[in-house]
Every structure is written in C-alpha cells, then in structure tokens.
C-alpha cells in the first residue's frame, strides 16, 4: 500500500504517468497553453471530510495531498525534513526539539508556526484514546512552544519509531487555525480543509467527484499539474468503460478493475500498465 501511495503522489507531483495510461492523454491533443493540465482518475468511494486528525471515511491519499507533517519519508524509507527543517534528540532519547521551516503559508495565506503546531497537538490529544493504535501519542508526556519557530515534546521513555510515526499521513498533520471548530476538537469535524500541502480542495460533491487545484502558496516544489479530478465510480466495469472512452487518464489502486480487465490492458499496446512491488507483510 505504501508503494502504491508513493506511485500516486509521484504522479500528482510530477506529471509522470506510471499506471494504465491511455493511448493519448488529453494534454497531447491540446494546443500549447490552451488549457490547464488536468489529471482525471477514479476511486470507488468518496474522499471523506479531509480532516487531518481523523480516519475513515477520510482517505489518506487525499489527506496527504492537502496536509503535511514535520518530517516525511524519502524514496528509500529514510526520514527527510518537511515542515521541520531540522531537529535535535536529547542523549536519553526522550526530548525532541524541532526547528520549523520559516515562511511556510497555509493555503489561506496564514502563517505556519509553533503556536499552530501546539494547537494541532492540543486537538489530537483531546481524542488521544482514538489514536491508541498510534504508538507516539501513547509516549508523548508533554509538549510546548519554545519560540515562534521551535517546538518541543518530551516522551515518557525513548521510543525508536518517533520520527517514522511523525512521517505517517495521519494523525499528526497540521490544519490552519481557520479550519478549527470553535471548541478546538477537530475529531468532531473541521470548518475547512486548509493545509500547507501542494494541493487545495477546490470543489467536492459527495459520492460524485472531488477537484483539487495546486496551492499557489506552497513552499516546496510546485506540482506540474494544475488540477486533479477524482471521479467516484463504485462499479469496476463502469470505471473501465470510462477509461477506455478517454474520460479517465489513469486507473490507480488495488481492486479498482478486475484482474481480467487489467490483463487485457497489459496485452493492448494502447495502454501502459505497472504493478508495484510489495513493500510490507500483513498478518
């Protein structure tokens, strides 16, 4: 699953089509500069509420498009800076001090800083029991703002996976202040999905479609795509027919079409197909 997610995010960020692309994309048939660069795909279920601190029905791929963490995974599983550009770990392995990236803006233009990090931590810990599966929240005993761009938390004991847990798509991701409900408890819902990530939710009609546009305030490398459209099509046969008709640019994900349909695309030179390598064992 992590590998599939990585393939999709690479697509979204860099306009590289790796999975089941049609004979000609819409871009190849357009005059240069005529229209925005749009990728249209399909899922079998709605994207959810795009709440960074919640789980189903929120979908982690779209959460990862809108929200970011302090750190991120690299191509080979290494930990890389993200909203934190550097950090220190105390000798006893219990105190983590993060130096936040300056100049980062949320998609509404507001500033990302240590006070916002604390606000998000406060909300996450209001519903700590809901995150009991997540090891890090069970080990954080205290946290505080050190200064405008420095945030620190202390663990009850050294916990080796700390940075890896922080790199996960949920729940420790950051919502702008304007997105918080009045009582500060995001697990009950949010006012708006405002993140620091490269994408903004432009339009959403539940169980029909979602449209994402690139974030003009994004601090990192800008996406080459202008827009990503996710059509919600529960039926696999309907999805395949729309793909063959050119209404979808790509079919991405596990179980979205039948194995026989996938094999037929493999055998047809009009289409490009790929199967990700297994990245984990589940039991």
Image: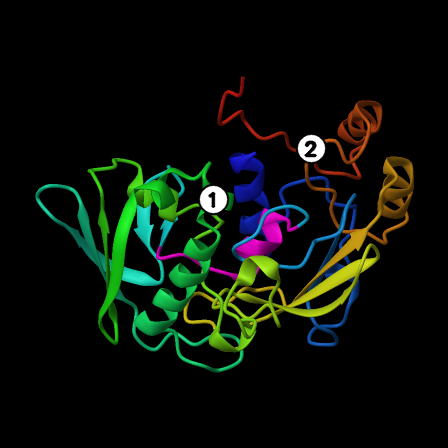
Tell me where residue 32 appears, x and y as whole percent: 70, 73
Neighbour tally class for label 1: few under 14, some 14-19, many 20 plus, Cα within 10 Å = few
Q: Is 142 located above or below residue 204 in the figure?
A: above
Label 1 element class: helix
Instruction: Tell me which residue sits at (50%, 61%) in the image.
Output: 67
**Disc 2 versus disc 1: nearer the observer:** 1
Frontmost residue, 71 versus 33: 71
Q: Which mark is residue 129?
A: 1
Quadrant in the picture for residue 114: bottom left
The residue stretch that appears in magenta: 58-70
- State yes or no: residue 40 in magenta: no
Asked which quadrant contains residue 194, the reply is bottom right
Which secondary structure lies at badge 2? loop
Residue 189 % position (x, y): 62, 62
Image quadrant in which you'd find residue 266: top right
Q: Single out the residue that lies furthest toward the top.
A: 283
What is the x, y in percent for residue 11? 59, 51
Neighbor class of circle 2 (other Cα within 10 Å; few <14, some 14-19, many 20+) is: few
| Residue 19 seen in the figure | yes
Instruction: From the image, tell me which residue sits under label 2.
Output: 254
């Amino acid at each position: 699953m992590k590998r599939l997610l990585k393939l999709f995010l690479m697509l979204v960020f860099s306009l590289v089509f790796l999975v089941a692309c049609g004979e000609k994309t819409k871009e190849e048939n357009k005059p240069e500069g005529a229209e925005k660069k749009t990728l249209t795909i399909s899922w079998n279920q709605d994207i959810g509420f795009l709440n960074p601190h919640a789980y189903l029905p929120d979908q982690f791929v779209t959460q990862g498009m809108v929200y970011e963490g302090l750190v991120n995974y690299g191509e080979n599983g290494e930990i890389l800076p993200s909203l934190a550009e550097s950090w220190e770990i105390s000798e006893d392995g219990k105190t983590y001090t993060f130096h936040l990236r300056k100049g980062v803006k949320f998609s509404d233009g507001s500033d990302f800083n240590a006070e916002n990090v604390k606000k998000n931590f406060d909300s996450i810990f209001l519903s700590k029991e809901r995150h009991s599966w997540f090891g890090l929240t069970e080990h954080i005993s205290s946290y505080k703002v050190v200064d405008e761009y420095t945030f620190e938390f202390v663990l009850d004991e050294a916990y080796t996976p700390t940075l890896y847990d922080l790199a996960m798509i949920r729940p420790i991701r950051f919502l702008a202040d304007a997105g918080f409900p009045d009582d500060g408890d995001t697990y009950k819902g949010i006012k708006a999905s405002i993140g620091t990530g490269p994408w903004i939710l432009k339009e959403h009609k539940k169980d029909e479609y979602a449209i994402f546009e690139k974030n003009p305030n994004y601090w990192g490398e800008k996406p080459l795509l202008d827009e990503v459209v996710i059509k919600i099509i529960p039926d696999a046969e309907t999805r395949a027919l729309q793909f063959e008709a050119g209404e979808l640019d790509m079919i991405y994900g596990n179980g979205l079409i039948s194995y026989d349909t996938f094999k037929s695309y493999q055998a047809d030179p009009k289409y490009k197909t790929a199967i990700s390598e297994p990245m984990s064992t589940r039991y």
